[in-house]
Amino acid sequence: MAKRRHNLLTFFLKFLLAFTPLASADYLSLTGAETAPNIAEFAFEGEHLLLTLEISVDDAQHFWPALKGHGNLDRLVAEANEYSNINIQIRSDTGVQDPIDLRVDAATRSPRYSPFAGVIDPRTGRRLPSIPEDKQVLKVHSRYDLQGSETITVVPPLDHAGFSAATIGFISSHGAMPVSNYAYLSRSVTWRINRQDPWQTQIINPKIRRQLRFPLHSYLYIEPREIRHEIIFRPRDLATWSDKSFDAWLPLNELLAIQLRNDTLAFLQSRNLLAVDKKVVEPQATEVTFLRLTSTGFLPLEVNESIQLGALLIGYRARFPVDGLPQNVEVGWDLFSPFEERVPSLIQDPAGPFPTQLTPSLPTLAWQNFLTSYDEPTVSPVTHDTQGLTISGKGLGAIVAFAVLGVCVFRFRNAQNYLMSLITPALGIILSVSLAMQSSLAIRLPAPASQENEQFGEIIYRLLNELPDAYLERDATKLEESLSQLLTEQTLKTTRDALDPIFRPLTITGDRGYVSGISNLRIEKFEQTSSGERQTYRTLCTWQTRNEGPFWGHSDRKLLDIRAMLDLEEHEGTWKIAGFTPITMRESVEPQKTWRQDTQPANGSTQTGSTANATPRQ
């Protein structure tokens, strides 16, 4: 029963993650504590504990028992500020600590993302808590002296049974390093402080910790035009491997950033060699990115952002160009942290991600090509698809038979040998019909595109669906060659500049992703702008793009609504984009089901060749 319940919960979580369009976070809180009506944020800064509280008006009396309990927010704030303490106990190694200062204000509740808020829990059949509806809260700012203590215990307001009298969700950090994700403060909780390395600061409770607690990570991305190996590690790991000193509280500055980049590139140049089809290859490009850990995963530092080395993470990326998917890829891993031997790893190919881990006994990151029905993404010109009249094998056979019979009758009309005049056409008819039955004849009829012709919508859809495959090319020359099959030569550069933001979209990590699907095409306006040898048309269209971008362990997925003006040109049966003017590009919560899809091919794929036909063999 326990196993069945666990499988059901796992399926439920996967279902939610798969169908949450804007779930760009990779490490999600599974407790739902971020939806609690009261939120506590504990931040250890130097020798002080900074406590920030958002308290619901309905629960204010639990934190200040002397309050009268009326619902007027301003009066509650005024009365609460009359007290120098709050009904939350902070214990250090030397005893109970009173706040150095405490201030209460009226404030608006901070927005917090929760993917499971308000949904049905499959384990119990009950609805999970939703985001609180009350937006006005009492906000408390307080500060406590740690006095050099190694352990700090927080006791919330308790009821007679020893549990928290109010529902409180909490999160904690040490400097810029997250210590724990959202959890419920149902009883007392104790932190063990590590002043030399905030990464090692932790809560003495195995069930309450940050979801990402390993210092080393390895990500291997197998893509149609590129293999990418990304490594995340700490400056302390680099200092340990290089036998150098480390100061966790040293702030990152420009000179230190240059030194860390140079040390990283020099150290990793001959490490973790990558082999493609049993042959060691050198990376075409390497880069170093500085990252920070948040409650939702790894994110690059902002420009000129200051952070202590103890909370800094170094991201190293090596790029290996390939012409297509290889048969196997191997990475020989030889870097381990002295604090944790396991290295969480992820291998992602067109069929999807595969999590694994590296250990000293299993130090090889290996990928084998098991894709049984995979088509390499290639760009094909969009030709003028004319209407056709197809004659089947039976119809063709009948035509051939009558033709042979007519020829024979005309040839032997004056023959004296009646037997030969009958046998010859009979044998000719049988042989001709048997050959004609093996094939069919297609006769193409001209059909110019028009607003009433659904064929024009199919031409636009095919052009838009070919563009993502072209943008998979990493080499600038190959990219231009692919785009030249879809864009006119005269406007190639200007049109490409307008297409780049849509078909090379920015991800949450700041890297360039790709478009994995085009759907819900609708033609709003259509007109022919010129006729003659080169027919040109202008159309106002709306459609949706499904954007993806796997970087630094993130699997960023977004659905965008696009509205743009397209200029199309037809020359010698080939259609190309002669101009592209984006009008709006906005994030969509869900597919626009109200959009008409009569201009989109009924059997047209909405996936690019990189993922649509990828099926792993079991």
Image: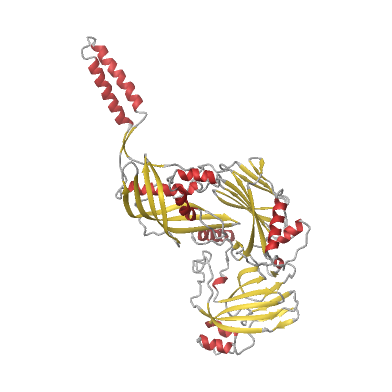
State which quadrant residue 421 falls in.
Answer: top left
Of all residues, the one furthest to the left in this rendering is 414
Residue drawn 67% across the image and 59% down it: 314
Q: Position of residue 269 (x, y in %)?
A: 70, 49
Q: Quadrant of the C terminus?
A: top right
Q: Position of residue 529 (x, y in %)?
A: 32, 50
Of all residues, the one furthest to the top in this rendering is 416
Q: Quick check: 290 above or below 330?
A: below
Residue drawn 58% across the image and 68% down it: 31
Please name whichever residue, 149 or 540, is drawn nearer the observer in this view of the structure.
540
Q: Position of residue 492 (x, y in %)?
A: 45, 48
Please name whichever residue, 24 or 497, is drawn nearer the observer in this view of the structure.
497
Q: Quick check: 59 above or below 255?
A: below
User: Can see residue 604?
Assistant: no
Q: Quadrant of the N terminus?
A: bottom right
Q: Quick check: 276 above or below 126?
A: above
State which quadrant residue 27 falls in.
Answer: bottom right
- The answer to whether 473 appears left or right of 403 in the picture is right
Residue drawn 45% across the image and 58% down it: 560
Q: Quick check: 194 above or below 528?
A: below
User: Can see residue 580?
Assistant: yes
Q: Position of residue 26 (x, y in %)?
A: 57, 60
- The answer to whether 556 appears left or right of 153 in the picture is left
Q: How is the image coloured?
A: secondary structure
- What is the number of callouts on the image? 0
Of all residues, the one furthest to the front in this rendering is 490
